[in-house]
Image: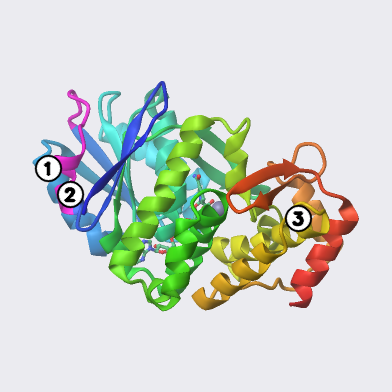
Amino acid sequence: MTERIRVGLADHPYDIVVGRDLLRRIHELVEFPIKARTAALVTQPAIAGLYADAVEGSLRNAGLEVVRVEVPDGEVAKDLQVLAGLYTTLARIPLTRQDLVVALGGGVVGDLAGFLAATWNRGVPVLQLPTTLLAQVDASIGGKTGVNLAEGKNLVGAFHQPLAVIADVATLATLPDRERIAGLGEVVKYGFIRDSRILDLLESDPAAAKRGDPDLLEELVRRSAAVKASVVAADERETGERAHLNLGHTHGHAVEALTGYTAVLHGEAVAIGMCTALRVGILEGITPPDLLGRCEAILTELGLPTTAPQLDRDDVWATMARDKKADAGVRFVLLEGLCRCTVTTPDRANVDRAIDEVEAG
Ligand SMILES: NC(=O)c1ccc[n+]([C@@H]2O[C@H](COP(=O)([O-])OP(=O)(O)OC[C@H]3O[C@@H](n4cnc5c(N)ncnc54)[C@H](O)[C@@H]3O)[C@@H](O)[C@H]2O)c1
Ligand SMILES: [Zn+2]
């Protein structure tokens, strides 16, 4: 069943369409700008081989000319040099202010092509076609775009809301198991911050979630995308409630960064970071202790980590404090109860003890 989720932003509302086999039906699902003639389809080789033909066909059915532009596989594509190459390509097409960019891929392609669209001709529309679980439930929604510098990830970026998001859950069948399971880390997060039905679904058949059962995945994507959509609509620029999406990301980001962004995938780091945040909350007297057991049990059933690698504690603190989400002190999203978040700066000794516990396993 195809479902539309509205992202109700006052200035630029848009739809997230969740369903299966949608990539060949884009022309039926999206209302393109009337004057658009050309679509620059940005993707990576591994994804292009699987899905670009279907996407090109349906963009042509929408009356668009399609120019396919491939960028290198992996996070290395979120790079200023790659972006400079894309600008040159768009200039040569030429891609005009009436035209659009289409992002086909995971969060890497979505962030890069989104930033390209945000900056090309002072902003052209971008259609997001996410093909990883992480991108379908998180990265493609909410308008954050950007590229990395050697000095840090996502340091150059812009808010640029998409024209629409088409989350074709059938594409997750070709995703490596580890990538799909890592994406479930974010799904579990949505369960704890807003929609506890997600946790019930995962608990009732964790094996199905782990092996990527299509019906279950579709419902999980639908529910997770709906949570992200409603949080973003309430707080587009992250001045308040949007921060709740960072549950598990404070220690999680440090683990990810200090292990070089490859040893631990983002969703795996979020799983670890949620365990830390729950322990911090318990030590602070804020979080009911039973939530930790529930979280660890779900993560373990899904094959996600609940313990952190041993890292130099000074480096962990330095990374947590440098995190752009940490303004005054190190801020944590903590749970006062199931689906009840609070943002605080906890006692440093409690954070240290929680990290000790998570590192000890
Ligand atoms: N903008 C945001 O709000 C936001 C939020 C979270 C993460 N991000 C960003 O997202 C990026 C990570 O995204 P990701 O986890 O999707 O990684 P990714 O884009 O690198 O994709 C993971 C791997 O899977 C491959 N792949 C993608 N779809 C596939 C498919 N359907 N079948 C087979 N292989 C496929 C890719 O080629 C890649 O090798 C990071 O750069 C992160 O900063 C952005
Ligand atoms: Zn995340």
Q: Which residue type does callout 2 highlight?
A: Glu
The label number, if any, that marks residue 60 in the structure image: 1
Residue at 38 percent across and 41 percent down: it is 86
Q: Position of residue 143 (x, y in %)?
A: 45, 36
Residue with the mark numbered 3: 281
Q: Is residue 197 above or below residue 11?
A: below
Specify whether 258 is left or right of 93: right
Q: Nearer the viewer, residue 288 or 63?
A: 288
Alpha carbon distance from label 1 to label 2? 6 Å
Q: Which residue type does callout 1 highlight?
A: Arg
Q: Is residue 350 above or below residue 268?
A: above
Q: Which residue type does callout 3 highlight?
A: Gly
**Disc 2 element:** helix
Note whether residue 110 is visible.
Answer: no
The number of discs equals 3
Residue with the mark numbered 2: 56
